[in-house]
Image (cartoon, rainbow, N blue to C red):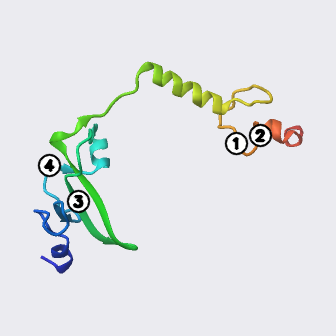
Amino acid sequence: MSRVRAAYFDPDGARYGIPTFWWKGAPPGYATRRQLRAAGLRPGGQPIAAQVLWRGIGGTRVAYLYRIDLAAPKRTATPAQRAAIAAALTARRTCRVCGQVQPYCIPRSLGECLACAFPEEDAA
């Protein structure tokens, strides 16, 4: 085992407080938040079970691991929540000046669609 791997190998948590593994050295049964999300799961309120440490830009980097067997399925949005999101996204695309729904989000810096903000460019 290399010195770097040995420095980050603490499976019983004596040195770092929680079980610690090196990059790509975690045993099966643990996953990061991203890995859980890709599998359709979420941590579900469980505490951090382990961590992965590695040397990166700016110092030692860390990724927290959760137990897969304690993970809960991802929650799905209700139809009312989906309708609220659709209404909010439509509001972001609706011009306050002309009232038209644009195929892009209205820039907050302008507060109106590009056709209303720059009418001389449309005439050309």
Q: Which mark is residue 107?
A: 1
**Which amino acid is tagged 1?**
Pro
Q: Residue at x 15, y 75 (%)?
A: 6
The first of marks 2 and 3 along the sequence is 3
What is the secondary structure assignment of the residue under circle 1? loop
The residue at which mark 3 appears reads as: 51
What is the secondary structure assignment of the residue under circle 2? helix
Front in this rendered view, residue 98 or 43? 43
The residue at which mark 2 appears reads as: 114
Vertical arrangement, residue 24 with respect to residue 46, above or below: below
What is the secondary structure assignment of the residue under circle 4? loop
- Can you name the residue that lies furthest to the bottom here? 3
Q: CA distance from mark 2 to mark 4?
A: 52 Å
Q: CA distance from mark 1 to mark 3?
A: 41 Å
The residue at which mark 4 appears reads as: 29
Q: What is the quadrant of the N terminus in the image? A: bottom left
**Which amino acid is tagged 3?**
Gln
The first of marks 4 and 1 along the sequence is 4
Please rate how many residues cluster around mark 4, counting C-alpha atoms within 10 Å: few if below 14, some from 14 to 19, many from 20.
Answer: few
Vertical arrangement, residue 93 with respect to residue 11, above or below: above
Looking at the image, residue 107 sits to the left or right of residue 41; the answer is right
Q: What is the quadrant of the C terminus in the image? A: top right
The first of marks 1 and 2 along the sequence is 1
